[in-house]
Every structure is written in structure tokens, then in C-alpha cells.
Image (cartoon, helix red, strand yellow):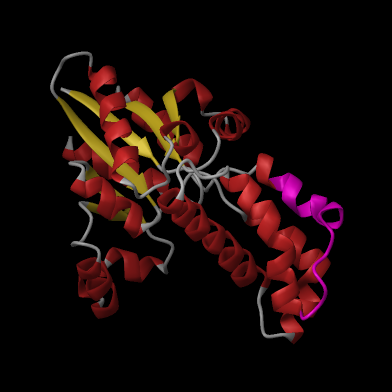
Amino acid sequence: MTLTICFDALGTCFTLQDIVKTVEERYGEGLAKKGWGSKGFVMDWFHSAQRDYTYLSLISPPPPPISSILKTSLPLSLSSALSIPPPKSSELEGITSLLSSLPAAPTLEEAFSYLANNEAKLAIITNGAKSTTEGYASKAGIIDYISSVVSCDDVGYAKPHKEVYEAANSLCERLEDGGKGQRWFVAAHLWDLAAAKKAGFKTALVLELPSESVEHDKQVESLNKWYETYGGRPDIVGKSLLEVAQEIIKKN
């Protein structure tokens, strides 16, 4: 039985930590005076851009590239947070240029190596551009483990549109080469997994919370209510990509 595993990219396999650091260096003091932390600001900007990418996909597909939305919205986000006129785009290139070279999430290379050594076929399904994502993967040392990258830019719809997961299933079918397979979807976002589950995938969540909360997540009331909102607890919940990868192999 072929094991095929699809991974989300932005926020799951690749992180915004370099952008957070640069925002802190340039705007951290001003943000703090307004009650913002640099990480909180960056995540708010990023999630707002993800939202707008999805909304524009609803309004008039295909949406513009998410990188375009991020670059366009950053001056306005900073203006709102800092109560300053919107900075010029040229003034923010030290931040926006980092969107093309996001670093790997912890244990990414170890997880992909482990899965490949266990004969899993790996793919990335992303709201980001295909070429940019392949660049992230090359920089992280995982490009040779990946069978394919599917970009929402090519599908014409953003996640969580069903068409994206249909494209992921079609890719899995090709990778299975006519055989029966087990299909998994891995993400750090529960909404992504809820859509993947509806499309027939088994799901695995990388949860960025204190270890004790993740290890005993079934006993954490707020987490269980969160899971319930999104259609139930994923098949696997883990602290890192490597832990999730190891659990997938156990269940295969």
C-alpha cells in the first residue's frame, strides 16, 4: 500500500521567524509602545493576507499571488499598528524580500528524511507560488524528497476551496500508480485539516503549544472545543513535524 503525505507549506514546513526578527529590529520599539509584540504583528499581517487571498478567490478566481497581497498590505498594516503614514514599498524591501526565502520549521529535514526512508511519497500543497516553494524546499535540503508541489496559483482557487484538495487527491492517485494508498494531510492550521478531512484525507496537526498541553490534548477543555468546532480531533496531534511523521509511520 502506497503511503502519500501532503504537507501545507506556509506556517507548517516554513516559518516567518526571519521576518519577525527583522520587524523587531526595525519597528519593535514602536510596536511595543502601541501594545504590539513583533511576532503578534507579523502573524496578524500574515493571517489577514491569507484571509484576503481566500476572499478574493471567492469573489473573482483566480486570486492574485499571495506574495502580492502580503507586499501590498504591509504598509497599511504598519500604518494602522503604529499610527504613522504608510511607509513606501521601497522602505519595506528589507522585510518583504524575506518572503522569497523563508527558513525551515524545526525538524523539517529530519521528518522528510524519515518518511522518505520509510518509502512515503511526499508532496506540498500551498497557497504560495510553486517556484518560491521549491526554492524554500531546496534551501531546507528537502527538495529531493518531494514528488511534487501543487500551488493554489495553478489550481485557480485558494485553500480551503474543495478544488485544492481535489487537486491533492488527483496527485496522490498519480503517485499511487494505480494501487490502493493511504493518504495523509499535515498542517499547523486546523481549518486546512478540516477541509482535507472532508476530502477523504487522514489528518495530522503540528500544534505549537507547551509540550504538556499537546501530550495531554484530549484532557484540555479548550482544545477539545476547538477540535469540535472544526469537525473533530485530527487523527494525529504532535509537537513537531518529526513527531507527526513518526506517528504516521506507526499507523501505516
Q: Is residue 66 above or below residue 154?
A: below
In the visual, does 158 lie left or right of 30?
left
Nearest the eye: 219 or 182: 182
Give, as a single range, the part of the protein colored magenta: 83-98
- Assign the C terminus to one quadrant of the image: top left
Q: Nearest the camera: 241 or 138?
A: 138
Closer to the camera in the image, 212 or 59: 59
Where 120 sits versus 108, above or below? Answer: above
Magenta stretch holds residue 128: no
Is residue 120 in sight in this rendering?
no
User: Would residue 174 be found to the left or right of residue 106 on screen?
Assistant: left
Q: Main secondary structure of the magenta part?
A: helix
- Residue at horizontal 29%, vertical 19%? 175
Residue 7: x, y in percent?
39, 40
Vertical placement of residue 210 versus 100, above or below: below
Residue 230: x and y, percent?
Answer: 25, 63
Q: Would residue 47 be found to the left or right of residue 204 on screen?
A: right
In this view, the residue in front, 206 or 82, is: 82
- List x then y, in percent, for residue 8: 42, 43
Residue at image location 80% in from the left, 77% down from the top: 29
Quadrant location of the N terminus in the rendered image? top left
